Amino acid sequence: MKLTLWGAVQTVTGSMHHLAVGGRRYLLDCGLYQGRRAEARDRNTTFPFAPRDIDAVLVSHAHIDHTGNLPTLVKQGFEGPICATRATVDLCGAMLPDSAHIQEKDAEFVNKRHYRRRRIDATVEAEAVEPLYTAEDVERTLPMLREIAYRLPRDVDDSLVFEAYDAGHTLGSAALVLERRRNGGTVRLAFSGDVGRPGLPIIRDPEPLPPVDYLIMESTYGDRLHKTDELVSAKLARVVNRTANRGGKLIVPAFAVGRTQQLVMMLHQLIERRQIPSIPMFVDSPLAVNVTEVFRRHSECYDEEAARYLWDGDDPFGFGRLRYVRDVAESKALNDLKGPFIVISASGMCESGRILHHLRNNIEDPRNTVLITGFQAQNTLGRKLVDRPAEVAIFGLPMRVRAEIETLNELSAHGDQRDLLRWIKPMTPTLKRIFLVHGEPLQSRALAAAIHETYGIEAVIPSRGDEFELS
């Protein structure tokens, strides 16, 4: 069994790992790499292997950095099954068409801008930009998704079996345990995907995994400890109240899957407890609207707190002051609406989608607040805002950052160092080596040191393309 680590290596985007077993080849995730436009384009269009040679893809969860490049894989020749939990399959049915729409609109926007520049200066050279993939590529991809169930072993081939465990990260998220049987012996490899935090709203806590020989594990927050939920709720209330008192708008970039639903439920609870005013709230993202419908369909994934809303005949994702926005004209009308109000919009790293329009129209007003609610990868607009610069470029135009910038990293659906150390404990009796991925170098190094100190196990921080023989 040979493992090659290609994506989300010393970074947090583009999860993709290649596994060769007995002449067959598999991918663990096939995520979209996000970052500088040129680098992202190159990473996402050029696979370090022939897509047609891949026999199957095993998906951990639906987030775009784990599934978003599946249509490119199919476009370039992949024809095998894509295995994922039932909720993940349904989420992909909403997210991948949206991603294709964004790819097409971004290419259209860039081409129009290049055309305008050439009209002004004929010496400007610019080739037409093609979308990474289109709606037609997604239509070919979705029928290839195959549903799997938690805790039900499934054969990939005669010698390889895998089993999914609830990773507690988002709806339908899975940690995968693969077992190769050969000549009476076995090799067991676990892939964490993204490991959630105990006590997160809506979804169940991460399940423990059985002992394994090797582990590919995320390290997003490997160098820190999250604050308690009580402090998070209080901080969110303070940000809402402070902005509302100024008559401002609270602009919240949020991932359409998980984070938006989490925020809606928390705001619902704060209003019920009268800790924030009942001001208008908008979820302005067609994707988030569609994803919320998927959340409603998969109550089997809920924890007890979220299920209690259903038992009481209530909707955890709907209340009187909340409106879900699909229509473009209605989205644009929010720019003319006077505050105070809250807008939750995608994308979570401020790289595309309607959130860019809300930022462009509101970031120069000091009454407003931009609330960053999750991890921001290097070179994204969200990361730049976290650093609170005097100016940022939005749609290529310089904008003064006069709005208040706040962060609420405690809402992260990624486990912190303590959570990750606790989660790997059941696997440690047999663990030979851990490969730390999905983390920037500082976070990965801190977690590697903590793992060695706690369990005496070697934790490797691979470089892109590093190969390992697993036996």
Image (cartoon, rainbow, N blue to C red):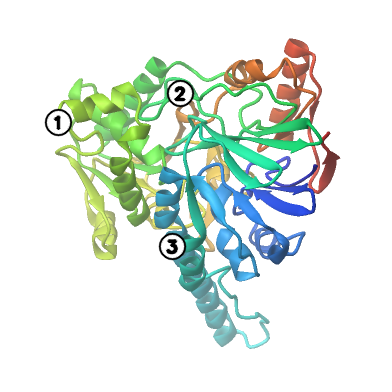
Residue 321 to residue 393: above or below: above
Residue 178, percent from left and from top:
66, 37
Q: Is 338 left or right of 110, judged from the image as shown?
A: left
Residue 57, percent from left and from top:
61, 52
Q: Which residue is mark 1?
A: 313
Between the C-alphas of marks 3 and 1, the distance is: 32 Å
Callout 1: SS: loop
Query: What's under tag 2, amino acid-wise?
Result: Asp
Query: What's under tag 1, amino acid-wise?
Result: Gly
Image quarter (top left, top right, bottom left or bottom right) of the C terminus: top right
Residue drawn at (41%, 18%), measured in percent from left and top?
229
Between the C-alphas of marks 2 and 3, the distance is: 29 Å
Q: Residues within 10 Å of mark 1 (few under 14, many from 20)?
A: few
Q: Nearer the viewer, mark 2 or mark 3?
A: 2
Going by the picture, which residue comes out furthest to the top? Answer: 454
Residue drawn at (45%, 53%), measured in percent from left and top?
92
Which of the marked residues, 2 or 1, is nearer the chain's N terminus?
A: 2
Q: Which residue is mark 3?
A: 97
Q: Is residue 72 visible?
A: yes
Which of the marked residues, 3 or 1, is nearer the chain's N terminus?
A: 3
Quarter of the rendering containing residue 159: top right
Callout 3: SS: helix
Between the C-alphas of marks 2 and 1, the distance is: 24 Å
Residue 200, percent from left and from top:
42, 25
Which of the marked residues, 2 or 3, is nearer the chain's N terminus?
A: 3
Residue 164 to residue 72: above or below: above
Q: Which residue is mark 2?
A: 205
Q: Is residue 249 visible?
A: no
